[in-house]
Image: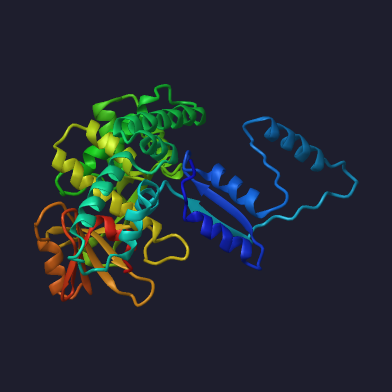
């Protein structure tokens, strides 16, 4: 089953670029990197050399490399060209909602692309209902290609989740190879569940200075008191660099120069988030609300990839006059500031409204599950599933 990926268009842009830079593709395990690169190479080049450092081709490559770099004192050294400074980097994520929707129902995806923003189209109420259902399905299973394929084959969330659990287990078992002092694979699961409990709390902020310190405290308190701070932080760093989790910053009192990185932690796939949130033991409403915030986090993080659409080194939330704002966005072009509030129901965001009235931002964007959208002055309202189409 072929799942159409938007990254393919970026690969074609690189191929057609006359600068001929070296391409580096990265991303988490099981996101489809090998598949899409092989497909791209087979369809666009006459010759391809495939080397996998985990199998025989990798062993043969290292033998060739060693032979090529051998040097006898007094003889001329071999010369190599390194691509430093001439690299185009592309990151592959799990499927976005748009990619999932196109695989699920191509006709519905076309209708999604035609919907006006931020105004609602009152002529097709059934489209909004179908899109909301598709979004809920996406949040439950996520975007790992094999998980999406399992869902499309059987239209069964449990079947898809079984595949997701298999992928998680593979990642955890492979990760243990890189840690000499971790003997219990459950350390990663403990970290995941601690992330969930931090996110599911009331918005009272972290007790510790960073999310790493907060996670380390929770893991050692609730699961393994023998786990050192160094080991826990190394495991958290591994999960981050492996593309499994991402960090969110904090803007103090809406002062953009008072930026604190790494003050929250989210999952980089909605399905992984849903799996662990449901295991954390809380209400369905709390899980739904936090899943929506996680989805928005992923979307904002993607907008910080090159070519960057929004500022900061990571997505950020903010505090203001004793309250909190879910996310704050500033555009690269035009330097427009948006306050972003993720709402499950009809509630109003008192803190964000207060900051908007005080001139701390240009616009307020409400993202809701049960809405068709609209605009009232500086306040936009969008269905959550339309966020990927919205241009800040």
> Does any portion of residue 217 appear in the rendered image?
no
The residue at 44%/59% (across/down) is 305
The residue at 14%/42% (across/down) is 285
Residue 44, position in %: x, y? 65, 55
The residue at 67%/63% (across/down) is 20
In the visual, does 21 lie left or right of 373? right
User: Toward the viewer: 169 or 148?
Assistant: 148
In the visual, does 31 lie left or right of 285? right
> Does any portion of residue 260 appear in the rendered image?
yes
Residue 283, position in %: x, y? 13, 37
Residue 150, position in %: x, y? 39, 34
Q: How many labels does the image show?
A: 0
Quadrant location of the C terminus?
bottom left
Examine the rendered structure and indicate whether residue 76 appears above or below residue 161. below
Residue 275, position in %: x, y? 29, 35
In the visual, does 188 lie left or right of 204? right
Examine the rendered structure and indicate whether residue 81 appears above or below residue 231. below
């Amino acid at each position: 089953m072929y799942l159409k990926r938007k990254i393919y268009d970026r690969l074609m842009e690189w191929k057609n670029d006359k600068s001929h830079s070296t391409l580096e593709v990265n991303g988490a395990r099981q996101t489809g990197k090998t598949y899409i690169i092989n497909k791209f190479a087979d369809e666009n080049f006459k010759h391809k050399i495939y080397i996998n450092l985990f199998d025989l081709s990798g062993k043969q490559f290292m033998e060739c490399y060693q032979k090529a770099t051998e040097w006898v004192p007094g003889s001329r050294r071999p010369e190599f060209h390194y691509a430093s400074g001439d690299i185009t980097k592309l990151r592959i994520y799990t499927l976005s909602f748009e990619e999932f929707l196109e695989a699920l129902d191509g006709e519905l995806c076309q209708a999604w692309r035609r919907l006006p923003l931020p105004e609602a189209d009152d002529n097709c109420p059934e489209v909004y209902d179908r899109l909301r259902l598709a979004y809920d399905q996406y949040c439950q299973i996520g975007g790992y290609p094999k998980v999406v394929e399992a869902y499309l084959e059987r239209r069964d969330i449990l079947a898809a989740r079984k595949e997701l659990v298999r992928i998680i287990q593979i990642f955890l078992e492979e990760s243990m190879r890189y840690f000499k002092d971790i003997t219990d694979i459950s350390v990663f699961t403990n970290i995941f569940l601690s992330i969930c409990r931090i996110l599911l709390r009331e918005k009272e902020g972290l007790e510790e200075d960073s999310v790493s310190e907060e996670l380390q405290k929770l893991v050692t308190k609730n699961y393994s008191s023998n786990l050192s701070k160094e080991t826990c932080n190394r495991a958290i760093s591994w999960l981050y660099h492996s593309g499994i989790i991402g960090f969110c910053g904090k803007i103090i009192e809406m002062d953009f120069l008072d930026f604190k990185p790494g003050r929250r932690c989210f999952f980089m796939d909605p399905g992984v988030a849903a799996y662990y949130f449901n295991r954390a033991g809380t209400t369905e409403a709390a899980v739904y609300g936090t899943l929506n915030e996680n989805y928005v986090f992923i979307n904002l993080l993607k907008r910080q990839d090159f070519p960057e659409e929004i500022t900061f080194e990571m997505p950020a939330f903010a505090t203001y006059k004793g309250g909190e704002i879910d996310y704050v966005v500033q555009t690269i072009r035009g330097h427009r500031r948006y306050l972003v509030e993720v709402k499950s129901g009809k509630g109003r965001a008192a803190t964000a409204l207060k900051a908007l009235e005080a001139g701390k931002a240009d616009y307020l964007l409400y993202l809701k599950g049960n809405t068709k959208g609209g605009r009232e002055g500086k306040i936009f309202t969008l269905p959550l599933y339309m966020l990927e189409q919205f241009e800040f």
